[in-house]
Image: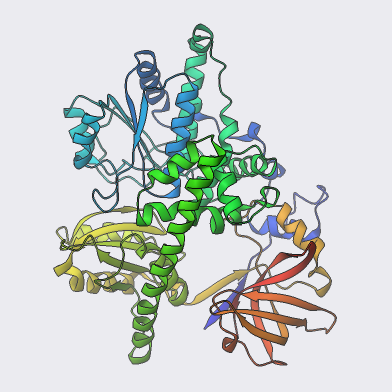
Amino acid sequence: MIKIKRRIVPEDNPLAELGFSDLIQRLYLSRGINNPQQIEHTLKHLHKPGQLSNIQKAAGIVVDAINSNKKIVIVGDFDADGATATALCLRAINAFGHSHIDFLVPNRFDFGYGLSTQLIPILQEMDCELIITVDNGISSIDGTQAALDAGMQVIITDHHLQAEVLPNADAIVNPNLNGDEFPSKNLAGVGVVFYLLAEIRAQLTQSNYFTDKQINPPNLAQWLDIVALGTVADMVGLDDNNRILVTEGIKRIKAGRTVAGIKALLKIADKELTKTTTETFGFVIAPRLNAAGRLEDMSIGIELLTTDDEQQAMILAHKLDVINHQRKEIQKDMQQVADSVVNELDKIKRLPDGICLFHKDWHQGVVGLLASKVKEKTNRPVIAFAPENDESEILKGSARSITGFHIRDALVAIETNHPQLMHKFGGHAMAAGLSINRENYEEFRRIFNDYVNKTLTEEQRQHTIETDGELESVDICLAVAEDLQNHGPWGQNFPAPLFDGWFNILEKKEVGQGHTKLTLQTQDFSKRIGAIAFNIHPNAFKPEDGKNQITYRLDINEFRGRRSVQLIIQDIVN
């Protein structure tokens, strides 16, 4: 049963004189905007790099490496945040005049996540003298020490939560370090790297490096399209600072000033540059980029983001598109198995509070997506497991959580009470990864469910959807839809406007596989509106002429040059 909870709008209104519509004011106020500066998404309001712990030291090490022509290797992660962070480092450090640089992204199937000890021989073969990790490293205790023992320097840049013990790196830059004073704790890995590069550029400028080398100092803002993509793709909170980074990045793409790779991905998806939004990142570009790391090798994605050759970019974008189609097919098969298990559990008894799922044929690169889908369906914390490989007795798990339940804290508690149960784990409040022995799966499932059962509140068990209330019929129009689109960026922790209301169904039909196209009528009978419900079958709606309470977003439908408002239905409430 879904419960609607409408967002509270504070009585004080510091936005009243800014000329926004009443609706936009209400949306901003309910999302914590209490200062006009918070919606001035300009670079002058970005937080300064100096507040990030160890950033001057880390930048100094890189500057010394550049001056000494040391071999730098970027050790990235195999998701979109890691790919964008790696690409940004490669582009910027090359533009600083240092070409003695390479990258290494561990294949998830052979090496797992982060700077592991297995990577050290490869890094030695690459003649690496300085490692810079991006979007990983905060939990790489053994790998960092092995690199140091091999004579390499190590700088860790990460945004994931730290454990009690930190790696013995030369410098660690992470806004989520204990005691770090950087105001935004929501930076993605690519955001952390952007700040480090800004500090490196400042130190090089101060030492007259660019003047002496007769190099035009690069403007880092030219790559904010890459920063914006990684930030949205990693689903970090869009606080004031991140909204600036994302807004400026989207502006660049809309103006056509974006890297060849992003242009190519949009072209492959038949999307126009000028219509780019955060949703374009989340639903069009990021899945294609992430597909490489899920099924094959993220090197394809990094090459795509670093090439300036538009023809090469199209070839690589096409490869990613093909891989993404393969990912969809694999996920579809896995989803059918997961749905049948969840449905059976629901029939015989109450669903577990903490759901663990495993199948010997599942693909470890796709279990995170599967966990997300099951979480959305059940409103429970979910961990989906897959074999590490065909021969291994290790299971790799991907965890996804619900609002208010901190999944990494749950794993920390389990590790404290059962220290031999997990090989390793890491993550943050809403998502985490872990590995266990196959023989321990049943025990882990029981312990996880017991912990969630004791911790989850009744309010968290209730499937509650926050909305922005009802819209008057007059406001369900193209002008309002455009206004909403223009007042983002919307995203994680700054959610896109979601409304609820009752509508009559005039027509409904299935389109694609399991989607529904509808014609709705407002309750006052004044308007007929087109709507689309993705992954909701027509049978889920009441018959024609039946009243349905739904939650929905206002969207713009473009067909043969004609633009009209349409509703994107998220949930059927009644």
Give the image quarter of residue 162: top left
Relative horizontal placement of residue 43, taking residue 441 as reference (left or right): right
**Quarter of the picture holding the C terminus:** bottom right
Relative horizontal placement of residue 320, taking residue 65 as reference (left or right): right
Whether residue 239 is visible: no
Q: Position of residue 115 (x, y in %)?
A: 27, 40
Vertical side of 494 occupied by 369: above or below: below
Relative horizontal placement of residue 425, taking residue 420 as reference (left or right): right
Question: Number of callouts in the render?
Answer: 0
Q: Position of residue 534 (x, y in %)?
A: 58, 74
Q: Position of residue 487 (x, y in %)?
A: 71, 52
* Residue located at (26% from left, 39% from top): 166
Vertical side of 73 occupied by 479: above or below: below
* Residue located at (50% from left, 23% from top): 95
Give the image quarter of residue 448: bottom left
Q: Position of residue 402 (x, y in %)?
A: 44, 66
* Residue located at (69% from left, 56% from top): 29
Vertical side of 16 occupied by 47: above or below: above
Vertical side of 422 occupied by 44: above or below: above
Observer-nearest of 136 and 280: 280
